[in-house]
Image: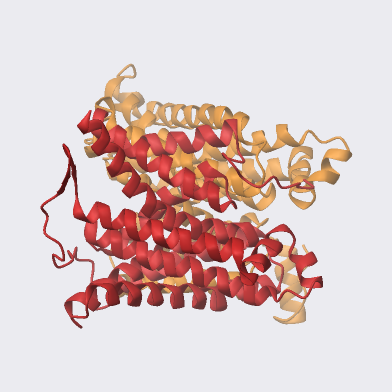
Chain colours: A orange, B red
Amino acid sequence: MSWGYISGILILTGINLMTVLGLSLLTGFTGLFSFGHAGFMAIGAYTAAMLTLKLKIFPESLAQVQFFMVLIAGGLVAMLFSLIIGKLTLNLKGDYFCIATLGFGEAIRLILDNVQFFGGARGLSSIPTQGTTTLTNVLIINMIATSVLVLIIRSRHGRNMVAIREEELAAQTIGINVFKYKLISFAISAFYAGIAGGLMAHYFGYIQPVMFKMVKSTEMTIIVIFGGLGSVSGSVVGTILLTFLPELLRSFANWRLVLYGVAVIIIMISRPQGLMGGKEFSIKGITKVLKKGPKGEVKS
Amino acid sequence: MSYFLQQVVNGLSLGSVYALMSVGYSLVYSIMNFSNFAHGGVIMIGAYVGYFCLTLLNVPFFIAFILSAIGSGLLAVSIEKVVYRPLRKRNAPFLYFIISAMGASIFLENIVIASPIGPTFRSYPAVFSTEPIMLGSVALGRIDVLMLLIAGLSLVGLMYIIEKTKIGLSIRATSYSIRGSTLMGVNVDKVIFIIFMLGGLLAGLAGMLFGMKYVVYPQIGNITTKSFIAAVFGGLGSLPGAIIGSVLLGIIEAMTSGYLSSQYRDLIAFVLLIGVLIFKPTGLMGKVTEDKA
């Protein structure tokens, strides 16, 4: 394994992590399920790619600045869409909201597939990859994203979201604007997914509607659940494991998705709280485990 | 005019096969309140069973139909036993059901790809001549007529079971209230076994019909997204709703590909889905559930 290969996987991990972090807020902390985040990734990816390809206001020397601006623009457009969709469908109960996001994601993909302006089924290509989605940039973005997410979750707003997840009716009774917080959570997760899309476009150098199928959304949601609902560190660990594992199993090519399916079912049946199960990694927790031995209760 | 009529017939036959699949969704949703995304895998296996019955075993055509229905039915029941029952015993939230269903669907699709069957597209041996039946100036494809016939008959059979038999009564009772029907002595495990069996049997027929009309391949189960849209359109949890929704969706699709372009067919289906969810989430005739929150 060469460094190029490993850094490639690391970049992919970073890209996945962006979407997963957003979904972690939405699913793990607010209790909403989305099967349409591939749609937001697509919006972010296409916005970023179009801007990079068509707009050339920044000189060569400021290429980095332009890259970050373009990413944020992608995130913002995705957020805008999420606000519209959220406004219309967040009133729906659990399953129906899920289905609405599924429909949204697929509709976005099919629109991109059919509109020639966006390149149709062939998508957009020759997006500059040099100096854009580099490992350093991805790491910086991931760090910022994780810190912001943790700050949100620890704030009053984050606690309101957790309250909604735990008991929506009770949350409403104590005066939390349930709809508003659901919308905020949805919008933030879409923003993250949009940025992930932009990163993806500049990593591969091309984007096609096929890359944003429903399977992509499911994959991301599965990572969140695998890592543990309501745990940011769980999401990080889950992303790293579930991005690396398929790569390591590449020689089994065909069988790895079979195993993947079985693993998902086994997790759901035997350890539904996921890897971390609502707990976070912390120095305190680790020392506690070390003191008490591996079976000690971690409360952090 | 005859072109229009022809599209109507195409739509009807397509819609009736959608209906075979969407009643499976609706039955499960009406009792267990979750969307069974593993249904696509069940349909795919049905299509393969039918294909191998015809090519390897050389069984008569109608026996192949029965065998593929039974194959799918058994598969659906075993998915319920292995995947959903443990979750059901734990009273897990619906999210876990959906995710497990996704897992099962990923598993089924890829086990076929990984097995010697492989990802190749296979076409059914020609059972009928491709020459259409002429009805006045309207040309009807033989397979389309067969789809309409088999789907229609099985749906009538299903409605009979649901509306007129004792088993149907217990299914209807359970869909109103699991707890209430348990208290009245209904064996809920048995009811759930039966709905998965019924859904699976119909899915097997649908799989084989689709395989004959198009080709068989591991991703053929994705077609269930359509039947799922149809079920939402008609109202999740309602059987007549699922059937009407499917037929309407079939006709809308046939009209779109007949008059606009077949490229927009899927797009229109999904836009319809979002539209229905925004304006009338319960669909045309969905059961009104009182949610606490």
**The quarter of the displayed image where residue B74 is located:** bottom left
Placement of B217 over or under A30, stated as above or below: below
Query: In the picture provided, is A151 more to the left or to the right than B113?
Result: right
Instruction: Please identify the quadrant where the C terminus of chain B is shown.
Output: top right
Q: Measuring from the top left, give residue B278's x and y in whole percent.
A: 58, 32
**The quarter of the displayed image where residue A134 is located:** top left
Query: In the picture provided, is B168 more to the left or to the right than B248?
Result: right
**The quarter of the displayed image where residue A154 is located:** top right
Residue sitting at 69 percent across and 40 percent down?
A152
Residue sitting at 32 percent across and 42 percent down?
B11
Q: Nearer the viewer, residue A100 or A247?
A: A100
Query: In the picture provided, is A36 more to the left or to the right than B138?
Result: right
Residue sitting at 38 percent across and 72 percent down?
B69
Q: Measuring from the top left, give residue A25's x and y in whole percent.
A: 63, 46
- Marker count (numbered): 0
Placement of A23 over or under A229, stated as above or below: above
Q: Is residue A249 visible?
A: yes
Q: Nearer the viewer, residue B226 or B251?
A: B251
Q: Is residue A133 visible?
A: no
Instruction: Please identify the quadrant where the N terminus of chain B is shown.
Output: top left
Q: Measuring from the top left, give residue A109's x and y in whole percent.
A: 37, 39
- Most distant residue in the top direction: A57
Q: Nearer the viewer, residue A41 or A282?
A: A41
- Most distant residue in the right direction: A174
Placement of B39 over or under A142, stated as above or below: below
Q: Nearer the viewer, residue B269 or A163?
A: B269
Placement of B153 over or under A26, stated as above or below: below
Q: Measuring from the top left, give residue A202's x and y in whole percent.
A: 33, 39
